Image (tube, rainbow, N blue to C red):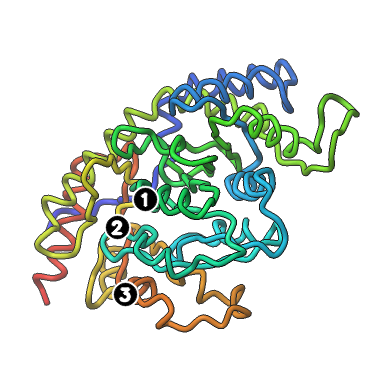
Amino acid sequence: MKDLMKVPFVDLRTQYLSIKEEIDSAIESVIMDSAFIGGKRIKDFEENFAKYLSAKNAVGVGNGTDALSVSLKCLGVSTGEEVIAPANSFIATSEAVTAIGAKIVFVDCNPKTYNIDTDKLKDTITQKTKAIIPVHLYGQPADMDKVVGFAEAHNLYVIEDAAQAHGALYKGRTVGTLGHAACFSFFPGKNLGAYGDAGAVTTDNDDLAVKIKMYANHGRVDKYNHEFEGINSRLDGIQAAILNVKLRHLNKWTLRRRQIADIYNEKLSDTVITPWVMPDVTHVYHLYVIQVHRDRQRLIKHLSEHGISTGIHYPTPPPFLNAYDYLSHKPEDFPVSFDLKDKILSLPIHGDMTDEEAVYVTDVIRDFYNAG
């Protein structure tokens, strides 16, 4: 075994130091101009992010959860209507649905991709179904041909939850351009992360973009002129300036994530279950998630003792959280998601990770299982 090495799950400090001059200059310019709310930085980032995705419009909002709820609201989803979302996701996906008074309807995940199981969508449709939110979980696009086909057949809106999939591709098209709207989080640990909460909605519908921008800014047409009641969920100037800098480096960081994933795949595929990637997609590996069938807690402890940080995404699928006790779901309702929760383990991966660190992680895992 190699000497002890510290391998963080993410390393935002190293990332910052690699682009320190650009970041510091961008933040200073906002402060010097007192351009904290609204202004050129937000407009620049919205235009740059839309261009990066090949989307017509991007609208900055306060965070990724608001991006979802604002999109649903502005598409006309209302109280009592139903929205389909995967059982395997972070609570933000379902939380955004109930925040606008709609009802969340969960669907189990595909056992290979962990994304929404499109074969089970037909079991969820009712007269009240209004929209579907496919989540591009861990950085791999959902099966959007089947999602969009199902939505078109039943006259549903499609809102992509792309919070973990900045720059991912589905059959040559960028995630964020495949539905009626798409929602991004720029939480600091994301592939494209701010230095606080931030989010965006992308859409090719110009009217929807205008409505979202107004709704997220108090329903405002201009100062003190409010066409309707909205909320306060604005991307601020400092975060927009930071994101403008980081966007220039995103492709480089994504390539590094994919290179680390290749090392993991090569060295771990005979030891654990490594991620399965659909044909014709580009996975951006926000998370690198393996499955282990025994001794997960002992493995986590072993990795920690060797300086390696890990995570579980997610230890409790949303249908089984206390927050959704009122839905009275049972394990047999979502057997795949319920089974996976005790097997999945997220390994360190980020845009500044070295080959040496990745090989060290694989050596420690292999040694653990070889030792029995």
| Mark 2 vs mark 1, CA separation in Å | 8 Å
Q: Nearer the viewer, residue 73 or 184?
A: 73
**Where residue 46 sits in the image (x, y, percent)?**
57, 25
Which residue was labeled with disc 1?
142
Taking the image as drawn, is residue 352 in sight?
yes
Looking at the image, residue 45 sits to the left or right of residue 287; the answer is right
Where does residue 241 sit, x and y in percent of width and height?
58, 24
Q: Looking at the image, is mark 2 or mark 3 earlier in the sequence?
A: 2
Residue at image location 70% in from the left, 32% down from the top = 213
Q: Around disc 2, counting alpha carbons within 10 Å, would you say few (fewer than 14), some (14 to 19), or many (20 or more)?
A: some
In the image, which is nearer the foreground, mark 3 or mark 1? Answer: 1
Circle 1: is it few (<14), some (14-19), or many (20+) Cα within 10 Å? many
Question: Which of disc 1 and disc 2 is earlier in sequence?
Answer: 2
Q: Are marks 2 and 1 in contact (CB under 8 Å)?
A: yes
Residue at the image point whose x is 41% and y is 62% from the top = 313
Query: Would residue 199 appear left or right of 3 to someone viewing this image?
Result: right
Q: How many marks?
A: 3
What amino acid is found at the position of numbered circle 2 in the picture?
Thr
N-term mark: 3 or 1 = 1
Q: Name the residue that disc number 3 marks.
A: 297
**In the picture provided, is 349 more to the left or to the right than 156?**
left
User: Quick one: 73 or 195, which is closer to the camera?
Assistant: 73
Q: Is residue 302 above or below residue 289?
A: below
Q: The N terminus is located in which quarter?
A: bottom left
